[in-house]
Amino acid sequence: MIIAEGKPIAEVAELIKDAKKVLMVGCGGCVTVCLAGGEKETGILASALRMLRQQQDNPLETVEVTLTRQCDPEYVEMLDKYVTDDIDCIVSLACGVGVQFLAERYPKWVVPALNTKFAGGTVKHGQWEERCGLCGECILYRTGGICPIIRCSKSILNGPCGGSQNGKCEVSPETDCAWQLIYDRMQALGKLDMLLEIQPVKDWSKARDGGPRRVVREDVMIS
Amino acid sequence: MVADFEPKIVAFCCYYCAYSAADLAGSLRLQYPSNIRLVEMPCSGKIDVRVILEAFEGGADGVYVAGCLEGDCHFLKGNIRARKRIGYVKKLLDEIGIGGERVEMFNLSAAMGPRFAEIAAEMTERIRRLGPSPLNKAYKKEPASSTAG
């Protein structure tokens, strides 16, 4: 899922300082799971902003809605009835995708309440970690299911490098050396010989390159 | 500081300890400040950040959660989780200028009636010292009557 983290309340308050009435939109997707922008977090942020503004004698009115997903027009359009003329600003508690989908649909000032961090998963309750670098061409089958693109600090394809010390990466004693993990895993799987094959330079044109990437499935298109 | 300030304090009390302790304090005819509004909860771990914020938004000057002694939670870890959430709310209240010291977590057992009264007094005293919450409409900032009395 996409992992995000709330911006400091003061920062969001600054972004909406000129607004009297804001529409606060939570997202029921990834950011609900990583406890950054679901219904609950929307309620907490709205309450905090109202209290902050009340102290400045500049009361803020909030309308809170949480959509199933903000990255899908069919759910975003459910917001139409809430986006009235008196709404001065929309605060999106989704990842950057949701913010943009709202901004594309409504001629309103849309601001993000979260910082979108990475594609990752829950390692334990309350802790999320990056697992995928979204490079566009998966090579996990060559590395025992451990991604060197995102988990190796250098994203090298023929590791480990000289900075691997006792299974840790030289950038931080808390970071496992991805290539040590890969080696151990391949050894356990009896596939160490696969690591002998030198990997050529990765084709990064499939990663972030040349504008937004697009996936098209003509067979499921309705019109 | 505002003269004659009587704080409004909401106490979220676990049914298995603090709420029973309040009962015991009553049976023992112990005196404690009438500033406390009790809310019974099935466990202190039921406390939600939104509920605490709602109390402050509604004008409460202080809020506390009272749960069982650590290790004694009827649901094993409810009070430990409540304590963590209180820590989170403290930071949030500091961030929005209300002040984290207006919220607190206490632990006591059902047999500790006198301690319940003590906590009520302790919290009332603390909030009285801090003054009214900036959101308490009854004491809107800078009351003009400082010469009165």
Image (cartoon, grey):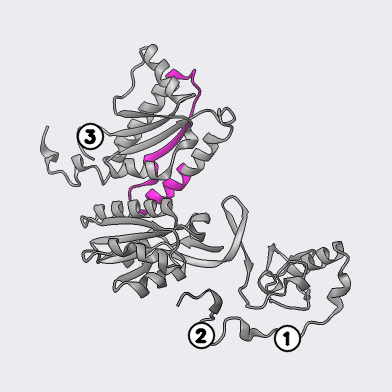
Q: Chain of mark 2?
A: A
Mark 2 or 1, closer to the camera: 2
Element carrying mark 2: loop
Element carrying mark 1: loop
Q: Residue at x 71, y 72 (%)?
A: A148
Relative horizontal placement of residue A47, taking residue A123 as reference (left or right): left
Which stretch is magenta? B86-113
Do pointers 3 and 2 mark residues of a single chain?
no
Amino acid type, callout 1: Val
Mark 3 or 1, closer to the camera: 1
List x then y, in percent, for residue A110: 34, 70
Distance between the alpha carbons at the discs numbered 2 and 1: 22 Å
Q: Mark 3: few, some, or many residues within 10 Å (few <14, many ≥20)? A: some
Depicted B41 relative to depicted A152: above or below? above
Say which residue label 1 marks.
Answer: A201
Say which residue label 3 marks.
Answer: B5
Relative horizontal placement of residue A2, taking residue A8 as reference (left or right): right
Q: Mark 2: few, some, or many residues within 10 Å (few <14, many ≥20)? A: few
